[in-house]
Image (cartoon, coloured by chain):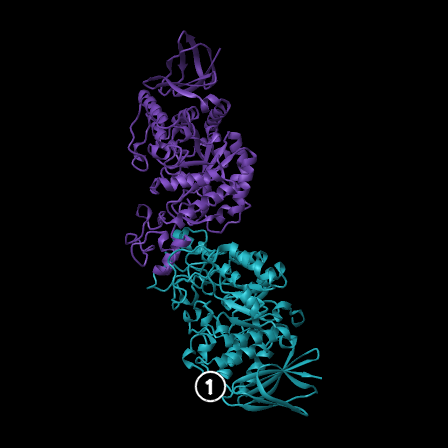
Chain colours: A cyan, B purple
Amino acid sequence: MTQSIKTPEWVKDAIFYQIFPDRFANSERVTKPSNLEAWDASPTPHGFKGGDLLGVAEHLDYLHDLGISAIYLNPVFQSASNHRYHTHDYYKVDPLLGGNDALRELLDAAHARGIRVVLDGVFNHASRGFFQFNHIIECGKQSPYLDWFTVKSFPLNAYDEKQKPNYGAWVGLHALPEFNTTNPQVREFIFDVAVRWIEFGIDGWRLDVPHEIDDDSFWQEFRRRVKNANPEAYIVGEIWTPAQRWLEGDQFDAVMNYVLTQPLMSFFGARTLAPLWHGGTYPPAKPMNAPEFAQAVESALSLYDWEITSAQMNLLGSHDTPRFVNMVGGDRSALRLAMLCMMTLPGAPTIYYGDEIGLSGGYEPESRGGMPWDRSQWDVELLGYIRGAIQLRNAHAALRRGTYRTLLAEGEQLAYARELDGERLIVAFNAAADPQTLHVPLAGGGSPRVLFGEVQEITRQDAVVSINALSRSGVVIALQN
Amino acid sequence: MTQSIKTPEWVKDAIFYQIFPDRFANSERVTKPSNLEAWDASPTPHGFKGGDLLGVAEHLDYLHDLGISAIYLNPVFQSASNHRYHTHDYYKVDPLLGGNDALRELLDAAHARGIRVVLDGVFNHASRGFFQFNHIIECGKQSPYLDWFTVKSFPLNAYDEKQKPNYGAWVGLHALPEFNTTNPQVREFIFDVAVRWIEFGIDGWRLDVPHEIDDDSFWQEFRRRVKNANPEAYIVGEIWTPAQRWLEGDQFDAVMNYVLTQPLMSFFGARTLAPLWHGGTYPPAKPMNAPEFAQAVESALSLYDWEITSAQMNLLGSHDTPRFVNMVGGDRSALRLAMLCMMTLPGAPTIYYGDEIGLSGGYEPESRGGMPWDRSQWDVELLGYIRGAIQLRNAHAALRRGTYRTLLAEGEQLAYARELDGERLIVAFNAAADPQTLHVPLAGGGSPRVLFGEVQEITRQDAVVSINALSRSGVVIALQN
């Protein structure tokens, strides 16, 4: 199997920006119904703020300036939920988002700037309003679509939430009827949706809870269809755990790399970790020191073939988690360091919209706030730091595709090398609250030059580079011959 | 107002065939789900038989041979009901019918044969699965679409049929939420649907219960939009009563002419009328003699401007009624005579699918049986008679566009003249159970020649044509100079 593993080249060079469409930006060109929630009010479970895809298109310059090269959009298809994971119609972009025409404009404008767009594919479950499920609610045993879902008795109690659903429903939620993916017509339906949007021009699918369709042959065929339509389409699964089963080259290209997210919080946020948030989507967390973190990184990087590893979707948080800054008790230094670390590790970094300007928020719905466009509300220093880290990654192929090697891991000190084609970079962190000197052992020659970060002094003596590091700081150094 | 009344020219020459899409013909080219009702089993309220639009396209030769020039299709949009009056999505032809592509093929094939296609527009109410209504079910007070419907309290009790619906619902049916057509966005939505399908190529709209949208300005704007997209598009309302309000030239072109249907049953079916059926959609009926019938016809023809009258949609029955043959106690002679009468009166005759081969059926769902395509089940004599009457109308413009004048109305004897541009036709009926001689008074000269129907003898003496008519017979005579 191994020799055939192939992932999209562009992903290895990509920096993603994740957008929750109802909350990023609102275009005046999309007519909206009247009953919307205020943009800056606290998000609620069922309220809509009216963000749309033309709003995204109108802010592509912002993303381009930030150095973003790909967008991962949370679901955009017609749905009666603000997160749109309850799909009503897989062939229509939601009218609140501007419909299919708005996605057309967004794709064209993004592609013109070299920015790719990946959609969220929610194929395990539909919604109660989804046609074929609604058909069974309405027609009962006489619906031709009985075998599209798993119905245990009639009539369906879809809207009687006092009883357990008498049909297959995701985590027992009435609102999320699960497809019967053993039905060949259902499989064809899902494959057709997947291919139709690839042909429309999207650059890949992020797959929601794909392990729930517990059937390798399903995802193998899914991959064949999608790659046949576009060999460079990205297929990335939402799997929170090690995921070898799906990453042997015949199913997904990558997963959302929560396996790395948790050490990033535990190390850079060790001093301020907010254990309150754990136990939601995250397992209980405890602080990590540098040796534990280096171990976790090496473990994460060794799970899969390098083709996969360098195309992983790395992230600090998402719509499914509290924002990173909330996970680390509000400490923006932890966010900065984790961002720099993510920008210097193998795998495509992903920024959850607003993290770069200091937006905060706990578990949903709080983590899905309206993006403020009044810059007086932004942490411009944070934004500048993150933009710099992004530009650094974009400028140095070694950070994207180079080998990884831990150089130093002691207490709160960490350093690692990234090397490619003779380019040798050192990334070093002092996570401590006080200035410290890092003694980074190095093979080979070359004099150090700071590419990113403030340091007091760097000296090289034989096989050791000594870095007088500020408190809570990171630095990227090039070794030049 | 009167001088501006204008209706489509083609309708005045058209003979319609009404098709209930789930029941007319089933193409092997449309993939169907598994759980379908047997084609020849008695129809049930919620069962699907799997007829589709490619099936219609594949039987256009049959319709063309019959002499049909237009099709009125019962609703075709995605719907979780076999009649599809519960619309789930106005922009999609139902997948069971073959989807939008099947309508494309049907339209192209029909137009190639000179056959026009009118769709059923169900704009007063949607369904519980319709996106914006489902949205309110799912999101409650926080749905942006609250003002698309008339919601009285929350949560919606859409699926709790033990309570009355707490929202505007057609005739109190939970399944049929009524649009709030005072909302400009709802109006635009409906107008957009109407125009979109006209632009797709349909030839008009039959409007379901349009009086329920009790707003002249709505239908005036509807007409402007539709006629702007295609000035020859036909707009015909389902209004069962005299309908002057809508037929002044600024709303509809015509209505379904049930005002004429009822006399046709009462006169030609006088001997066998099945009063059992009345009290459903029909008012209580009693038999009519010829003078009463002639009076009813003249009254019906005088209701509107001639432009309207000659574009009325005449019919003997529909999906909303028992079939005509059932209304008249199974007497096919009544069906034959009524067909001939409809083919010789002003207004576009409409044949409800299967009536022409003797298909029977009471109130719904019985009147919506599967069309048998095994010709051994057909009444070929009836079919031949009706085909002849159709061909007669198609051959003689006087029957379509000529003036109407009652010549004789006594007992069970009826005769009327249709004249146009010097062509003078006499239509005569002996509805009695025995042979009778009709003495038809005539002004002007000309010797009689039988165009249609069997008669024993016709003689002319001065201003009277005497017709020795067979029992239960009709004849059409041309007067030639």
Residue drawn at point x = 42 percent, y = 73 percent:
A363
Coordinates of residue A187 in the picture (x, y in percent): 53, 58
Q: Quadrant of the N terminus of chain A?
A: bottom right
Which sits in the foreground, A23 or B467? A23
Q: How many labels does the image show?
A: 1
Residue reaching furthest to the bottom: A461
Q: Is residue A193 visible?
A: no
Q: Quadrant of the C terminus of chain A?
A: bottom right
Where disc 1 sits, the SS reads loop
Q: Can residue B281 be seen in this view?
A: yes
Q: In this view, does A431 lie above or below A199?
A: below
Coordinates of residue B420 in the picture (x, y in percent): 46, 19
Residue reaching furthest to the front: A376
Which sits in the foreground, B271 or A461? A461
Residue reaching furthest to the top: B462
> In which image quadrant can residue A247 be found?
bottom right
Which sits in the foreground, A84 or B194? B194
Coordinates of residue A50 in the picture (x, y in percent): 43, 60
Q: Is residue B218 above or below residue A245?
A: above
- Asked if residue A415 lies left or right of residue B262, the reply is right
Coordinates of residue A211 in the picture (x, y in percent): 51, 68
Q: What residue type is labelled 1?
A: Arg
Residue position for label 1: A271
Label 1 crowd (10 A; few <14 / some 14-19 / many >=20): some
Which sits in the foreground, A81 or B78? A81
> In which image quadrant can residue B320 be found?
top left
Given the image, what chain letter belongs to the residue carrying mark 1? A
